[in-house]
Amino acid sequence: MNDQLVIGGKELSSRLFIGTGKYYSDEVIPEVINRSKSEVITVAVRRVDLNRSEQHVMKYIPKEMTLLPNTSGARTAEEAVRIARLARAAGMGNWIKIEVISDQKYLLPDNEETIKATEQLAAEGFVVLPYMSPDLMAAKKLEEAGAAAVMPLGAPIGTNRGLQTKELIKLLISESKVPIIIDAGIGKPSEAAEAMELGAAAVLVNTAIAAAKDPVAMAEAFAQAVEAGRTAYRTGMATKSETANASSPLTSFLDSI
Amino acid sequence: MSFYLIYKQLKDVPIETYMQSVSEADVRVVLTKQELNQEDLLALLSPAAERILEEIAEQAHRLTVQHFGKTIQLFNPLYVSDYCVNHCTYCSFSVTNEFERKILTEEEIEVEAQTLRATGIEHVLLLTGESKQHTPVSYLKDCVKILRKYFSSIAIEVNPLDTEEYEELFAAGVDGVTVYQETYNEDIYKQYHVKGPKRNYLYRLDTPERACEAGMRSVNIGALLGLDDWRKEVFLMAMHAQYLQTTYLGTEISVSLPRIRPTIGDFIPTTAVYDRYLVQCMLALRLFLPRSGITLSTRESPELRDHLLPLGVTKMSAGASTEVGGYSQDDKGTNQFEISDERNVNEISEALIRKGYQPIYKDWVHL
């Protein structure tokens, strides 16, 4: 059965988004892309020489990939908007992942500034994917501001601590009209599978792949986990119970009649 | 508020006694924690921790890769003037040292910038001796105007300035400030800083705060290791960094661990900071400040720099010159200190790649 994710009018088969930061060498990125089966890749605009886009990481990204430039380094909505415009002007497309982080200690996103930037950039025609702290009202405001998807964190960036914000994310998944993509914190394939089982539309994984001993093999592991989690979600999982249950406790008497 | 208030409380804490009481088992407990407190930091700097450096190093390596990946940002200093009005007993630029002083003209800065940029470096640290008379803010702004054409990030290491002056420079395109306290020990500070405005301990101590208040994106602090007991210095520096990080959430706070290098004159460091101790300092800082950048300069030898890479370093200078006009002029100035790693940018990049690290030339865009 067709299970494509549609964002900004683009149909995506893979629900695993990946990043380009933290690799020991950019040369490994093509094989990571290949084995992850990912179709969306985020790139920090601040690391790209916009005057020479053939340089650095960009030359390792196949043309068919959807580029998701991010505004990492921005501390305010204004800075994020300027970075987004620079990325578009440099030919990086019109998708943008808003990252507005004014806390450099824990690197938590500033939801208020993120909403402002989303509003502005959506109005300018960008496909905006904002990274945010999982707060339901903020997520609704992002949706209203024109976000194409909302990207709550599972745990702070780079911590690999998994879905620490699970209960809040569940609310976002349940109440949002736009896809919820879990970004940051996922450290293991099993956590990606869990995110998908919860009903997340996709996950974005960078550190757990880039900092693995074998990033290529880890990319494949994440691809499998995301697929497994999605299949489990679509199939519908049995509910948990604290005690053992007979398979048909209320109607099994019928068999003996 | 000023870190000075915290410093006054900390300076009378019996640090040595506490550190002597720490056991290897205590240090191992610290290694199980996610957030470290002041006592944990002291444990990591204690003599007991020296005996289990490898275990601490494993943790430091894991944290560094987790937060920064296997990447090292490269930058280089660009000295535009060696005029200085201070007499610091450990520095070649000291006003008491007699040598022909230089200050670059706009044309010379342009050539110097072009030469440095041609190496691929995009992050530059603009340096001067400390003389507001010779290198006033207006001169620095002229420098920045030129450097902006070539570099994506411009930090400064100049004489401490007022908040408004930092604001002016931020508006002109400066995004970072480096300032070393040299020694946190207020009691001996004046012995090393014999003459000049640098004698004002408090004004220097508050400099990073003024830079943060002015909106600088990054502020780098450090203690010059060798002027006082290194354990105390690194403890206070880490507390200073933590204070800045907590108070100024928007500014990236990073730290440096410069050791005294040979200079003009006959200065001999008061305390020896052996390689083993430098490693311990770096590991303690990485565990205490897991997301902070740690800078390693060309003061250290190539062999040591290569070995320090996995332990917490995130930024390195490469192919650095510590002389005015050092990249392009035949008639260079006097170097501020002797560098130890003389490899050029390419050689350092290749060494990083061999070690499994990616050199990062650019990590910011002008806005």
Image (cartoon, coloured by chain):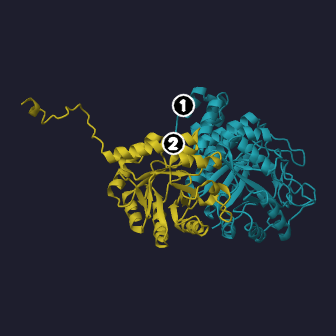
Is B12 left, or right, of A166 in this rendering?
right
State the residue in front, B82 or B356.
B356
Vertical arrangement, residue B261 with respect to residue A255, above or below: below
Q: Who's cyan, chain-wise?
A: B
**Which residue is the site of mark 2?**
A220
Quick check: B120 above or below B310?
below
Number of dots carrying numbers: 2
Q: Amino acid at mark 1?
A: Val
Q: Which mark is residue B29?
A: 1
Establish whether labels 2 and 1 are both on one chain: no
Q: Looking at the image, which residue is at 58% across and 55% down?
A: A62
Chain label for disc 1: B
Tell me which chain the residue with mark 2 is part of. Answer: A
| Label 1 CA crowd tier, 10 Å (few <14, some 14–19, many 20+) | few
Q: Position of residue A122 (x, y in %)?
A: 46, 69
Please name the amino acid that badge 2 sits on. Glu
In what element is the residue under mark 2?
Answer: helix
Q: In this image, B106 relative to B4: left or right?
A: right
Task: Count residues near mark 2 (Cα–Cα under 10 Å), then give few for <14, some for 14-19, many for 20+.
Answer: many
Colour of chain A in the rendered structure image: yellow
Residue A59: percent from the left, percent from the top? 64, 56
Residue sitting at the far front: A1
Residue occupying image coordinates x 23% and y 31%: A244
Residues at circles 2 and 1 in contact by the CB criterion of under 8 Å: no
Looking at the rendering, in which quadrant would you find the N terminus of chain B?
bottom right
- Image coordinates of residue B306 in percent, x first then y, are 74, 40
The disc placed on residue B192 is none
How far, Cα to Cα, is label 2 from label 1?
36 Å
The answer to whether residue A149 shows anywhere in this view is no
Q: Position of residue B91 (x, y in %)?
A: 84, 51
Left or right: A57, with A127 as reference point: right
